[in-house]
Image (cartoon, grey):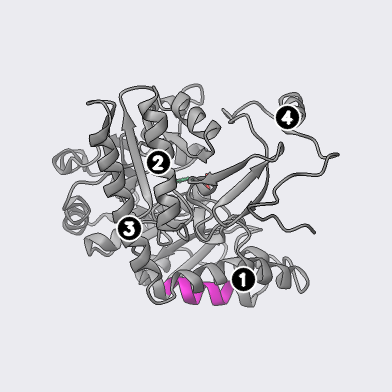
């Protein structure tokens, strides 16, 4: 196999280019995505190459997934070794990669029980089912409602899309499942007013990623924790995007010094191999007794083998401190760029660690396209925000390179 390097990215002459791949895609794929018009064929670290041989600096990393970059040699080696040993046994049997991963992950998160699945939506689905079962077991079956937030994103299954506080994702899929309610993000008083006799839990993202990289105001999570304690509700934290070191702490809730009852994880957990997890406290874990929940592929051995290396690398001394420092450097650079551009062009620069949103005075999608042409991959979050979620291994020099491209493109609008 040919190893891509920065100086030698060109595809073989016989390989199909962007245009022919995209033409075929339009014939055969369900047209449910707004896809950027390039087909990516190779990646190494923070770089990817398209089918025409053009190189890009990848500042979206498969949407906050490839935290250790593309084809990290230690993760590749672990996945390959597992491929040569045993792929899949289902949860009818025990398997060591999954057990090791549960040990590492529960220790890191400070939540003692792990359930494995394959995606963020499935991890959130587990939070929802856990909540309903806990309330039944407590003898309060009338409590089934989950309060979540406007502009939130929790997934695309019927239940998780209903928890998602964005009407555009609901349209056409009614009737939606019962038991969900949305309130304005960051408004503790609104949450307090929304809690009623049917309320069972609050589901919250520490930072709304898809919603435009919107930060919870200072003290919001702590306020939710106190409200949950006062009213006997579960506090569920969706760490699918913000977890796994993205914000410079293992999980974003840790910035606020709170203890959730349960969290969901996915995206970066397998660094690109499908893997999700729900972690929870011992007392609530007891409700999901044998047979109550499950997943055939959940905790798949190859994904788990990769995830074990991801965890080991993220937990190396100094790794997250470096993410935090690079994140501060990046945010400062974003704010300097905002000040240097014509007033109002950049309305806000938000983020934590290596998750950054640059809110523009216009639709983000055409700007994302210009950035791509200039060799920088990002995506839009919300209508007007450009989202950066680069691999956590990105260097300061590469962050500056990204900021330079952003500045040139925004100055040319
Ligand atoms: C991406 C995301 C999800 C959904 O994850 P899938 O793996 O696409 O199902 C859920 N919650 C948050 C916060 C996300 O960012």
Quadrant for the C terminus in the image: top left
Q: How much space separates mark 1 and mark 4, taking CA atoms? A: 32 Å
- Checking the image for residue 25, the label placed there is 4
Residue 287 in view, yes or no: yes
Q: Residue furthest left?
A: 189
The verdict on residue 125 being magenta is no
Local secondary structure at mark 1: helix
Quadrant for the N terminus in the image: bottom right
Who comes first in sequence, dot 4 or dot 3? 4
Position in image of residue 12 (x %, y %): 81, 44
Position in image of residue 320 (x %, y %): 37, 67
Q: How much space separates mark 4 and mark 3, taking CA atoms? A: 37 Å
Position in image of residue 41 (x %, y %): 70, 45
**Given this view, does label 1 or label 4 mark the residue nearer the observer?**
1
The verdict on residue 99 being magenta is yes
- Checking the image for residue 252, the label placed there is 3
Who comes first in sequence, dot 2 or dot 3? 3
Q: Are marks 1 and 3 in contact (CB under 8 Å)?
A: no
For the record, the magenta segment spans 98-106
Q: How much space separates mark 2 and mark 4, taking CA atoms? A: 33 Å
Who comes first in sequence, dot 1 or dot 3? 1
Tell me which residue sits at (48%, 39%) in the image.
378
Up the image or down, 312 lies above or below 126; here it is: below
Tell me which residue sits at (42%, 30%) in the image.
409
């Amino acid at each position: 196999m040919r190893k891509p390097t920065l100086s030698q990215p060109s595809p073989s002459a016989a390989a199909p280019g962007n245009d022919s791949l995209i033409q075929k895609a339009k014939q055969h794929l369900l047209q449910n995505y707004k896809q950027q018009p390039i087909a990516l064929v190779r990646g190494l670290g923070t770089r990817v190459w398209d089918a025409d041989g053009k190189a890009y600096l990848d500042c979206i990393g498969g949407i906050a997934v490839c935290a250790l970059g593309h084809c990290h040699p230690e993760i590749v080696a672990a996945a390959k070794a597992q491929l040569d040993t045993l792929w899949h046994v289902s949860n009818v049997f025990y398997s060591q990669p999954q057990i090791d991963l549960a040990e590492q992950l529960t220790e890191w998160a400070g939540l003692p029980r792990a359930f494995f699945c394959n995606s963020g939506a499935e991890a959130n689905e587990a939070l929802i089912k856990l909540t309903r079962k806990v309330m039944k077991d407590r003898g309060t079956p009338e409590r089934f409602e989950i309060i979540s937030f406007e502009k939130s994103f929790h997934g695309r299954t019927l239940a998780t899309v209903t928890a998602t506080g964005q009407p555009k994702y609901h349209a056409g899929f009614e009737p939606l499942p019962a038991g969900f309610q949305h309130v304005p993000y960051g408004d503790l008083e609104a949450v307090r007013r929304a809690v009623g006799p049917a309320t069972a839990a609050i589901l919250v993202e520490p930072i709304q990623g898809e919603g435009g990289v919107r930060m919870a105001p200072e003290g919001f999570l702590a306020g939710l924790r106190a409200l949950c304690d006062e009213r006997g509700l579960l506090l569920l934290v969706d760490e699918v995007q913000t977890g796994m070191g993205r914000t410079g702490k293992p999980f974003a809730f840790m910035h606020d010094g709170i203890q959730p009852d349960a969290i969901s994880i996915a995206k970066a957990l397998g660094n690109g191999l499908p893997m999700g997890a729900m972690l929870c406290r011992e007392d609530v874990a007891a409700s999901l007794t044998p047979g109550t929940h499950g997943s055939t592929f959940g905790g798949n051995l190859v994904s788990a083998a990769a995830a074990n290396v991801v965890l080991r690398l993220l937990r190396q001394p100094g790794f997250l401190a470096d993410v935090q420092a690079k994140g501060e450097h990046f945010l400062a650079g974003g704010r300097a760029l905002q000040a240097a551009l014509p007033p109002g062009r950049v309305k806000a620069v938000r983020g934590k660690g290596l998750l950054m949103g640059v809110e523009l005075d216009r639709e983000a999608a055409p700007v994302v396209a210009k950035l791509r042409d200039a060799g920088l991959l990002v995506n839009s979050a919300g209508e007007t925000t450009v989202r950066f979620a680069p691999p956590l291994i990105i260097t300061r020099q590469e962050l500056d390179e990204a900021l330079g491209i952003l500045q040139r493109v925004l100055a040319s609008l």
